[in-house]
């Protein structure tokens, strides 16, 4: 029996058409780009993917709120349940973090140990993914996060610098903090999974 005879009368005359699965060709000028810079992060139970490297675009809404961020890179990190990325610092890099509601939740921590800061010693805790919350993190501020839920969380973050995994590179931006270097009273304010 021919296809036309098999579908005759299923959805009215001429409404059902044959599904074609072969490629119709790619649109001129369109591009499919496989992300080349993806880093597995088994230590922290996830991965990091660079979505875009930019030449610098100001984030208008953050600037209106008093946080200047010239975006040079957009990343996405998948954080497994129960995993934490302990406190770390970028000496020059500024970041903004966002977890899309419905795609998990993260508890973010920021600790200000900058010598000249009027808020030196402050510890902030912000839940991301519960509301449409964008967290701006200044350079020199310790930060980390914890996925206390039972599902993956997807963290999108914007950075002021391009990532470089080579610790010998002048562009390398990440530093870890030894627990013994943190003030005891500050450690008391942090849950165990956030202690570096």
Image: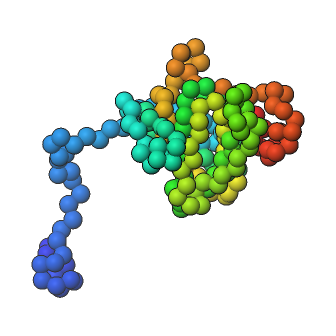
**Is 95 displayed left or right of 141 in the figure?**
left
- Quadrant, the N terminus: bottom left
- Residue 108 in the image: x percent, y percent? 66, 47
- Residue 187 in the image: x percent, y percent? 83, 39
**Residue at (17, 51) in percent of width and height:** 24
Does 193 appear above or below 148? above
- Residue 117 in the image: x percent, y percent? 69, 33
**Residue at (54, 38) in percent of width and height:** 95
Does 64 appear above or below 165? below
61 or 90, which lies in front?
A: 61
**Is 84 displayed left or right of 27 in the figure?**
right
**Residue at (54, 50) in percent of width and height:** 134
State how many labels appear: 0
Tell me where residue 114 sits by quadrant: top right
77 or 68, which lies in front?
A: 68
Does 2 appear above or below 143? below
Tell me where residue 145 sits by quadrant: top right
Residue 111 showing in the rendered view = no
Residue 45 showing in the rendered view = yes
């Amino acid at each position: 029996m021919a296809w036309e005879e098999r579908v005759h009368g299923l959805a009215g005359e001429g409404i059902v058409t044959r599904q074609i699965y072969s490629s119709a060709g790619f649109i001129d000028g369109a591009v499919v780009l496989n992300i080349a810079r993806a880093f597995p992060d088994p230590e922290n139970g996830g991965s990091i993917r660079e979505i875009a490297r930019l030449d610098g675009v100001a984030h208008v809404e953050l600037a209106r709120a008093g946080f200047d961020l010239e975006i040079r890179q957009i990343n996405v990190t998948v954080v497994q349940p129960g995993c934490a990325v302990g406190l770390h610092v970028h000496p020059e890099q500024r970041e903004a973090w966002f977890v899309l509601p419905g795609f998990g939740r993260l508890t973010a921590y920021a600790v200000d140990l900058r010598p000249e800061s009027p808020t030196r010693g402050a510890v902030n805790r912000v839940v991301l993914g519960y509301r449409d919350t964008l967290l701006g993190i200044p350079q020199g501020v310790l930060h980390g996060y914890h996925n206390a839920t039972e599902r993956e969380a997807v963290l999108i973050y914007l950075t002021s610098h391009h990532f470089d995994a080579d610790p010998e590179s002048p562009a390398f931006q990440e530093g870890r903090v030894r627990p013994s270097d943190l003030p005891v009273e500050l450690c008391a304010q942090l849950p165990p999974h956030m202690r570096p």
